[in-house]
Image (tube, helix red, strand yellow):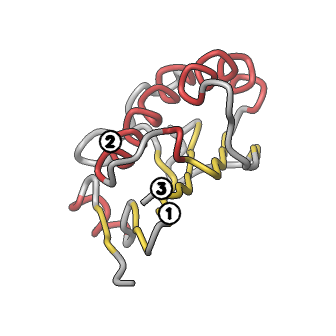
């Protein structure tokens, strides 16, 4: 199986040294997504809810590139600098994305992310049904 790489923001990803996603066979691994604009600048600074919405929007674009949806996600790892703030808003929104079947994963509170303005980062693994 030849890996199929996908870059959401090629210039930013080249500068930081990563690809946003790679598919090998039926498995897709997606790097942690953060709330940023096309130039890599943080967006929704100080707003956990909007950062979470922005992160999931980017993840959806990546999933769609591979013909997948959140129904195909099997692992979701959340990294946040403020777990109480994340917990206060995540339940209803994640319920809308995943419906009645949530993926496995871990939620970790961390001291910091790549830039101090980032409050949340989410990485995914998905499994393609074909």
Q: Is residue 2 above or below residue 65?
A: below
Q: Earlier in the sequence, mark 1 or mark 3?
A: 1
Q: Quadrant of residue 5?
A: bottom left
Local SS, label 3: loop
Q: Nearer the viewer, residue 71 or 8?
A: 71
Discs 3, 2 touching: Cβ within 8 Å: no
**Going by the image, does 23 lie left or right of 8?**
right
**Going by the image, does 23 lie left or right of 46?**
left
Viewer-nearest of discs 3 and 2: 3
What separation in Å lies between label 3 and label 2 (alpha carbons)? 18 Å
The percent coordinates of residue 104 (x first, y second) are 73, 48
What separation in Å lies between label 1 and label 3 (alpha carbons)? 15 Å
Residue assigned mark 1:
29
The quarter of the picture where the C terminus appears is bottom left
Residue assigned mark 2:
61
Q: Earlier in the sequence, mark 3 or mark 2?
A: 2
**Going by the image, does 123 lie left or right of 34?**
right
Q: Nearer the viewer, residue 61 or 50?
A: 61
- Crowd around label 1: few <14 · some 14–19 · many ≥20 (10 Å): some
Q: Nearer the viewer, residue 42 or 96?
A: 96
Residue assigned mark 3:
129
The residue lying at 46 percent from left, 27 percent from top is 45
Discs 1, 3 touching: Cβ within 8 Å: no
The residue lying at 62 percent from left, 51 percent from top is 74
Local SS, label 1: strand
Q: Is residue 31 above or below residue 103?
A: below
The residue lying at 24 percent from left, 47 percent from top is 39
Q: Is residue 116 above or below residue 49?
A: below
What separation in Å lies between label 1 and label 2 (alpha carbons)? 14 Å
The quarter of the picture where the N terminus appears is bottom left
């Amino acid at each position: 199986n030849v890996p199929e790489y996908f870059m959401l923001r090629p210039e930013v990803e080249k500068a930081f040294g990563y690809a946003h996603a790679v598919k090998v066979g039926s498995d897709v691994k997606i790097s942690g997504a953060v709330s940023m604009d096309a130039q890599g600048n943080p967006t929704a600074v100080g707003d956990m809810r909007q950062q979470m919405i922005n992160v999931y929007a980017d993840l959806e674009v990546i999933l769609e590139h591979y013909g997948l949806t959140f129904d195909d996600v099997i692992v979701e790892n959340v990294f946040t600098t403020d777990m109480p703030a994340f917990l206060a808003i995540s339940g209803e929104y994640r319920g809308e994305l995943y419906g009645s079947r949530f993926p496995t994963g871990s939620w970790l509170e961390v001291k910091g992310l790549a830039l101090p303005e980032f409050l949340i980062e989410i990485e995914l693994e998905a499994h393609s049904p074909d």
